[in-house]
Amino acid sequence: MLKRVSALLLCVLMLFCLLPAAALAADGEAEGFSAAYCNSDTEAAHDGVCWYTDTMRGGVLTASRLADPAPSCAGVYDGAFVTERLSEGPVDQLLWWEGRLLVSAGETLLCLDPESGAVLDSRRFEAPVARFAVSPAGLYVLTGGSVLLLTDGGERRLLSGVERFWLEDADTLCWMEEETTVHSVRLSDGSRSAAPNPVSVLPDEPAGEGVQGLGLAGLKQKFPHGRYWNHMPNRGTGMAYNNQNGWTWQACYKHNGYCGTAYQTCNGYAPYGQELSYQCWGFADKLGYDATGRDPQSLTQSYGWKKLWTSSSLSSLKAGDIVRYNKNGSSRYAHSIYVTGVSGDTVTYADCNYDGTCVIRWGQSISKSTLRSWFVFLLSAPSGQQQENQCLVNVNAMLDGRKELDTEGWAVFDVWRNGALYKTGVNDFYEYVSAGTSIEVKNVRPAEGVMYDAAASTAVSGTVSANRETLLILDHYYLNSAGERVKTTLADLPAQSDWSYRPVCWALENGISGGVSATSFGPALPCTRAQAVTFFWAFSGRPAAEGSLSFSDVSETDYFYHPVLWAVGQGITAGRSETSFAPDEACSRAEAVTFLWKLAGAPAAELPEGGCPFSDVPEGSYFYHPVLWAVSEGLTAGVGEGRFAPELICSRAQILTFLWKLEQLQASSQ
């Protein structure tokens, strides 16, 4: 036994010996009872710190602390979490109590320093610890089917044959010997009672003939455990363009502190295309919508969802409901869960973004007593799912012959319902509507950064009489010199507002480059010397060349063999050495301008008044005259601050821009 300390540090517990002498008397009465009590759970919080058993990382104990506030998140979130691992092995349950953490790990109960995770004391039992709770009366532990009360006066067995137990309040201990009945005892007078245990479980499949909506199995399949609800197609596309039916293999680029900004990559459920919610809240709403076909955010449209603001509503909590709570009463630790099962005090749930990464979790559990202490509101699900007169309408996109992937958002469109605008700026439509409803999809347009012929997409309109899926048929295109749309399978062309769009389109139109694959042009990729010489050769009309090469790294089977043979014959390049051309090395700005100058016939250029404008282009360098010529002809202006940056690597788009400008120069001189 450790030395007893003052009552102020009573809750340090030190696992059983720092408690006041308030053990139950023989008749069950407890002395000096107060309102303070706490049940163990999978998470705990206090004073800006959240501790939890991280099920996605082997159940280790993790602490999340609120770091310095990040940029404002549109009034939704203004902080960032820093997570720290506090244990090596798995932790089952925990609770915070007056400056210490109590955690269970198998048969062992440990008292930890909440900052470092250091073990202050421990006790091992013969069987695993299934649950524990604490109050001024002592420490209650469920192990081997028995509830033990531990105080500084010793250990006492209170109950046997117990499956689960919890403190309903400081004076009421509840337990279950079987799933059907909840037993309770008043600790102050020993009186007992029993009541039926309402069990609610989300069915694997929707129950009832003609029911629309997804059951538990369908929801899990649609949003797999361990994946990420990261459904922004590109950073900066804005909250209106989210793919809320999708998931990805990797966490989002940024979530905390970047909602609604140009750096956002994930978003909440936005049923009307414009609404932004917390990621966890949005995911819970999305599950509620997919399970019932009724929007949890549409409380005014008689969809059957009800918003309840008192914690007493948890007494009627059921599978399919959504709970919002603030950990430790702090809105900075607000979280939302989708309930999949309720039995006694145990709530099973699914959630998203519990750690700031948008990860999806199923099969999590939390106690009603914990939810009650942190309660914000409850969204009570409608009593039934959509019935036989409801039809599922799903509008999606097919781009270049491929159905839209879960991680992409290609099409943006507006939806009209019964002749009135219903949703705007969405990239999918997945909803149950009453049979006979008129649905029209209008104003199809490309998502930001995506080029395709939206005007040629299939029109969607008509009265719904059965479940239907409609695909918007879309094709990528580029604009040729006449402003005509030319179909292409290249999906990463620059935006029309980008400086490289016109040069890239010119290169495609004139056969100078066809991309790095069937679906990718790679405009921002570093341009290799082999690619650069091939561009110059194609620009010159793909002329035939004779002779041989001494380069050991260029063979006759290489796509760049004839371009290199031609470039050497024309004196455009002599390679990096007599035996090496270095085809796979990136082409620098100095090399690119020199190639360009020699292709133009190595014209002379007058030295500008005041000398060379670039401090990093010394007289005598091989690129000195090429740079002077390129500046005089307006082909380059350097990179700013009096620098040409000859060593910088050129991208594919930059090399093509040099050639495009040369073509314009030659055309103007004719």
Image (cartoon, grey):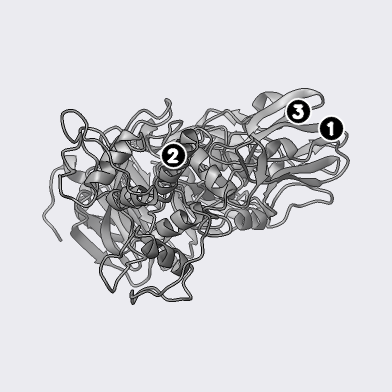
Circle 2: residue type: Lys
SS at badge 2: helix
For marks 3 and 2, give the CA distance.
47 Å
Work out whether residue 616 or residue 339 is closer to the camera in this orientation and state it: 616
Is the C-beta separation of discs 1 and 2 under 8 Å? no
Q: Left or right: where does residue 268 sit relative to residue 166?
A: right
Sequence order check: which comes first, mark 3 or mark 2?
3
Q: Position of residue 551 (x, y in %)?
A: 33, 74
Which residue is tagged 2?
Answer: 661
Circle 3: residue type: Trp
Quadrant containing the N terminus is bottom left
SS at badge 3: strand
Q: Residue visible at 49% across and 52% down?
A: 539
For discs 3 and 2, the disc positioned in front in the rendered view: 2
Which residue is tagged 3?
Answer: 416
SS at badge 1: loop
For discs 1 and 2, the disc positioned in front in the rendered view: 2
Work out whether residue 163 or residue 384 is closer to the camera in this orientation and state it: 384
Which residue is tagged 1?
Answer: 437
